[in-house]
């Protein structure tokens, strides 16, 4: 019936789209996307994609990372953001220098790792996250994402890294379009806040866990240790 049905003029746009699928697939593909007696659009989509899944994809498309941060991390990982070195290949632009420091050509590696602003931001992050062996250049990000098991600690670090790249990119855009630049300290505070709330919203999902976490925070602040305890240790205390 589905395969032989002839579309009538007055059917909805959505139904027409659905019927159009017939020209690009077949019954076997539809049946392969069935699980537990139900059709799964996600499974069907994944079966249609012929590209091989890359190793680092699981680290990036992870729930602990805010969706818009995942997107920028993915772009940075594949060196696809429109930094000035890329832009100048097809557009005449007034300057190819980094809009944040104006000391070097703006490349992915410069903007996220070599720029004095980025380096200072990662130093600030290290003060509350603990020592992390960050990638040194954009070409290392893919490998860095697969550095170890995708456990809670590494997922938290990935989440902080994604937030960092996102906010560094956002700050770079503000430098160009609003002529305003943040400070590494402020950026680091924002990164911590965003990572914190994202992780808490997904992990402290019961009032018991929230109470345990709140108590942990209180005890650490009384002991004057709040600023020096790594984020993943802090978050881990509400999970285990
Ligand atoms: Zn710079």
Image: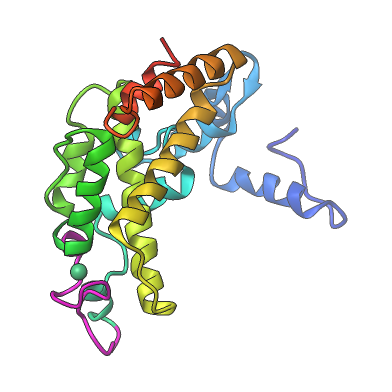
* Residue 125 in the image: above or below residue 113: above
* Residue 57 in the image: above or below residue 219: below
Q: Who is closer to the viewer here, 205 or 60?
A: 205
The kind of secondary structure the magenta stretch mainly shows is loop
Is residue 223 at least partly visible in the picture?
yes
Where does residue 214 sit, x and y in percent of width and height? Answer: 50, 21
Q: Who is closer to the viewer here, 181 or 217?
A: 217
Quadrant for ligand 1 reads bottom left
* Residue 179 in the image: above or below residue 81: below
Is residue 53 at least partly visible in the picture?
no
Where does residue 12 sit, x and y in percent of width and height? Answer: 82, 52
Where does residue 97 sit, x and y in percent of width and height? Answer: 19, 79
Question: Magenta segment, which residues?
Answer: 91-112
Q: Who is closer to the viewer here, 146 or 190?
A: 190
Q: Quadrant of the N terminus?
A: top right
Q: Is residue 179 left or right of residue 32?
A: left
Q: Quadrant of the C terminus?
A: top left
Q: At 28% across and 54% down in the image, what residue appears?
A: 76
Q: At 49% across and 28% down in the image, what residue appears?
A: 200
* Residue 90 in the image: above or below residue 61: below
Q: Is residue 102 magenta?
A: yes
Q: Is residue 115 magenta?
A: no
Where does residue 116 sit, x and y in percent of width and height? Answer: 16, 63
Q: Who is closer to the viewer here, 162 or 132?
A: 132
Q: At 36% across and 38% down in the image, what residue appears?
A: 159
């Amino acid at each position: 019936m589905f395969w032989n049905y002839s579309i009538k003029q007055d059917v909805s746009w959505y139904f027409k789209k659905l019927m159009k699928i017939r020209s690009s697939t077949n019954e076997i593909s539809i049946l392969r996307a069935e699980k537990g007696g139900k059709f799964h659009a996600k499974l069907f989509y994944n079966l249609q994609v012929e590209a091989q899944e890359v190793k680092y994809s699981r680290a990036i498309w992870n729930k602990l990372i805010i969706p818009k941060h995942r997107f920028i991390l993915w772009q940075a990982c594949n060196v696809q953001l429109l930094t000035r070195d890329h832009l100048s290949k097809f557009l005449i632009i007034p300057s190819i220098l980094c809009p944040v420091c104006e000391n070097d050509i703006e490349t992915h590696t410069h903007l996220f790792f070599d720029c004095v602003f980025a380096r200072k931001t990662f130093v600030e992050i290290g003060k509350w996250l603990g020592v992390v062996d960050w990638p040194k250049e954009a070409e290392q990000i893919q490998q860095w994402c697969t550095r170890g098991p995708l456990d809670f600690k590494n997922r938290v670090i990935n989440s902080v890294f994604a937030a960092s790249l996102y906010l560094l990119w956002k700050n770079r855009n503000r430098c160009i379009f609003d002529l305003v630049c943040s400070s590494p300290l402020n950026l680091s505070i924002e990164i911590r806040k965003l990572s914190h709330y994202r992780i808490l919203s997904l992990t402290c999902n019961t009032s018991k866990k929230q109470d345990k976490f709140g108590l942990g925070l209180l005890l650490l602040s009384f002991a004057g240790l709040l600023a020096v305890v790594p984020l993943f240790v802090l978050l881990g205390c509400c999970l285990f």
